[in-house]
Amino acid sequence: MDWINTIIKILNDPFTPAGEALAKWLSGFMPEVGVPVTMMVIRAAFIGIFALVMFMVMTWIERKGVARIQNRIGPNLAGPWGLLQPLADGVKALTKEDITPDNADRIVYNIAPILSAAAAMLVFAAIPFGPGLIGTDMNIGVFYILAISGMGVLAILLAGWSSNNKYALLGGFRVVAQLVSYEVPHVLSIVATVMLAGSMSLTGIVNAQPVWYIIVLPVSAVIVMLSGMAEVGRSPFDLLDAESEIIAGHHIEYSGMKFALFFLAEYVHAFAVSCLVTALFLGGWLAPSPWVSVIGVAIMLVLMLIGSALNQSPPGAEAGSRGGVIFVTAILGMLLIAFSVLAQYGLTVPYLWFFIKSIMVFNIMVWARGTLPRLRVDQLMSFNWKFLVPLSLANLIVVSLADRLAKDGLGLRAGTWPWALWMLAFNVALLLVAFALVGSAGRHARVAEEAPAAEADARDEHGEQPHHEEHAAHGEPAAAAAH
Amino acid sequence: MTTLQVMFVLVGLITVAGGLYTVLARNLFHAALGLVVSLAGVASLYALMEAAFLAAAQVLIYIGAIAVLIIFAVMLTEGVMGKRPRANDQWGYSIVVALGLLAVLLVTLYRFDWPQAAPAAVPADSIVRLGKALVEPDLYVLPFEVASVLLVAALIGSIYIARDKRVEK
């Protein structure tokens, strides 16, 4: 049965033997010095092309997903199920007129979208797609990703200024304020995972997850996800570059391919954040154990059945398409369970698991975009500074306390289920306390609001209180509790 | 020449070019961008020396925060944007001083007795050592804590200066 073992090895990791073969072929006609550099360039190009291809897939998922949430179909003309729509978008962007505004700073105007896209794509150098499948396994992987996100902030500032447009400049300032603010809870919550894993290297963090960190550190996962979405500038945090608001903010003056580059930067960065969340919290390329995947698929199918029983098909959808979607999901679920069973026997196919998980995280982002209303800029800022930052600080303290208690006090070992459940209990307690505090403060504010408001010192909590109707609101539904 | 030396020369040229552009550019905003290029070059130099943490910290702090701050300051100051004549008449003297400094440095570097042993390999757990060095009582915990007190003071001060001075309860 030796050929089964070879097949399993090739399926698990087709890239390393291909890379070695390529290197040997290159060294046939190249001097020794040039081979490693050429291999590095080829690997970088491969990762870059992967990021760009995933950009196409992400835009398709986003448009179809948001459309279905909004009870319409989405693009379906450019190929079966609209799969060639991203190509059509690309052609459109290339053929649009390339406008440069008067008195705009030409060099900076052209550099800004390139820098933005480059900062988004550079993140992929540190993402672990498999045990050896990483661009470069730095021992500061997570720190590198944070540094590169900081560079993306600069690009937006350049774009806002060089457009020679007051609205672009103002939009650029506000976006930079938002990005810089949301880096704080992002970093603090990532530090919690680094602390538990004992290493900043993403491969090390993935290897420290026999129990996925989303069970051990759910609060951190939620905070990283939220601040990741805010870092990218997606809904519900996209006040600053949404078309109906400050008229697209820092990319008002960009058209054609340059705008497509900003668009690309946003989606590639969103996918990069999904990959980061996968690597940090969802066990990266580790396959779930079979009973976990059975439970997961069962829950998903039950939810879909309930959902389809409650909703109608969108107008114009093909007859029987709901049943078709459930059928396809059931088949994919069976495949998932089968793969997780096979993973127990050695066919781990790590890159496939990583891919599936990051697409699922991206789907959560699409879901948030389709269902949540936009936050106003002061709501955004107070959400960050008054809720997320204290919560992430408290999370850091609670996590380190619980971990130390578990290891020294109870003698639990990291990576085992009892330790994970202990940490989960502490995290849930933290979340309950946080919501209780915020809820009581909100109640106080609401009561004080109903009292004569002249002398009421209605302290501004967390942004979703009814007294925001006094301000020049954009008409957002202010009464909905935006927890 | 090895690959490392070629990369070093290239990165050095980029850093120096960025620095030259910073002091020679007519437009203050372009000068700030030249500074960003220079800082990125310094980060690459750190990376060439296998000080990965320093390189990432350089990008995060200098380019991600300090350069942004400098650019904000340039943008929000009235009248410094756009082309202006070179405001400084002392450029002749500055060139002389800079060249003199360069001469002193070159002579010192040439005459110094550099150790000839090959550099030791960077330990694999350098991050762990850095972390331990910052919190161990007999290493650098005191400067670390003093620096954090300084940062908190700066934070409080800036919030106080920038606070809303309307109705103070």
Image (cartoon, helix red, strand yellow):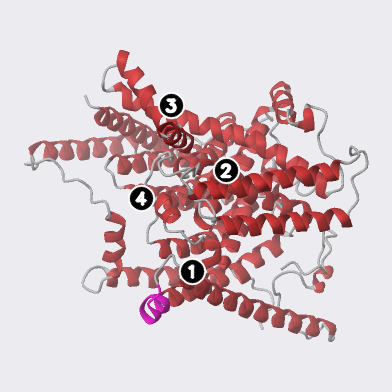
User: What residue range appears in magenta?
Assistant: A404-412
For residue B120, side relative to residue A433 (left or right): left
Q: Mark 1 — residue?
A: A417
The Cα atoms of the two marked residues, 3 and 4, are separated by 22 Å
SS at badge 3: helix
Q: Pointer 2: residues within 10 angstroms few (<14), some, or many (20+)?
A: some
Residue at mark 2: chain? A
Q: Which mark is residue A334?
A: none
Of A122 and A74, nearer the camera is: A74
Q: Quadrant of residue A464?
A: bottom right
> Who comes first in sequence, dot 4 or dot 2?
4
Structural distance between the alpha carbons of marks 3 and 2: 21 Å
- Mark 3 or 2: in front is 2
Please tell me if label 1 and label 3 are on a single chain: yes
- Spatial CA distance of label 4 from label 1 is 27 Å
**Disc 1 secondary structure class:** helix
Mark 4 and mark 2 in contact? Answer it, CB < 8 Å.
no
Decide which of tag 1 and tag 2 comes sooner along the chain: 2
The residue that mark 4 highlights is A139
Q: Is residue A78 visible?
A: yes
Residue B168 visible to the viewer: no
Say which amino acid is labelled 2.
Answer: Phe
Q: Residue at x 26, y 21 (%)?
A: A32
